[in-house]
Image (tube, rainbow, N blue to C red):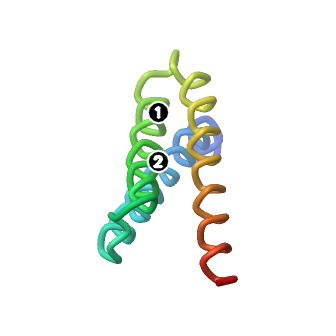
Amino acid sequence: MGELLEKRFPDLVALLVALGFMTLLAELLLTGHTEGLQVLAPVAAGVGAGLTALGLLVPRLRLSSLAALLLVGAIGLVGLLVHLEESLE
């Protein structure tokens, strides 16, 4: 059992990351992040879930998916700056 878990650990982590992106997408849609610049957040969450699933299902695209996920992270930083700016007003 330990060997199987050790072998599949990266796949399990990727699956949990994809589920996390889908949960974030649901939360953002339920809280109304759909207007103006805020629309980037649900789009990024959906793209993140898709890229993670793509990397999980197509092993030869894992490196490309990982590189694209770095761009998704950059969108998260934009969201952080937008919320920080709003809180300072």
Residue 30 or 60: which is nearer the viewer?
30
Q: Is residue 33 above or below residue 5?
A: below
Q: Position of residue 14 (x, y in %)?
A: 53, 44
Query: How far is mark 2 from mark 1, CA to CA?
Result: 7 Å
Locate residue 49 relative to residue 79 in the image: left or right: left
Do the numbered discs 2 and 1 sit on residues whose CB atoms are within 8 Å?
yes
Residue wearing tag 2 = 15
Under circle 2, the secondary element is helix
Q: Position of residue 72 (x, y in %)?
A: 56, 44
Under circle 1, the secondary element is helix
Q: Position of residue 73 (x, y in %)?
A: 62, 48
Residue at the (60%, 66%) spot, across then down: 82
Q: Residues within 10 Å of mark 1 (few under 14, many from 20)?
A: many
Q: Is residue 7 above or below residue 36?
A: above
The residue lying furthest to the front in this view is 89
Locate residue 21 relative to residue 69 in the image: left or right: left
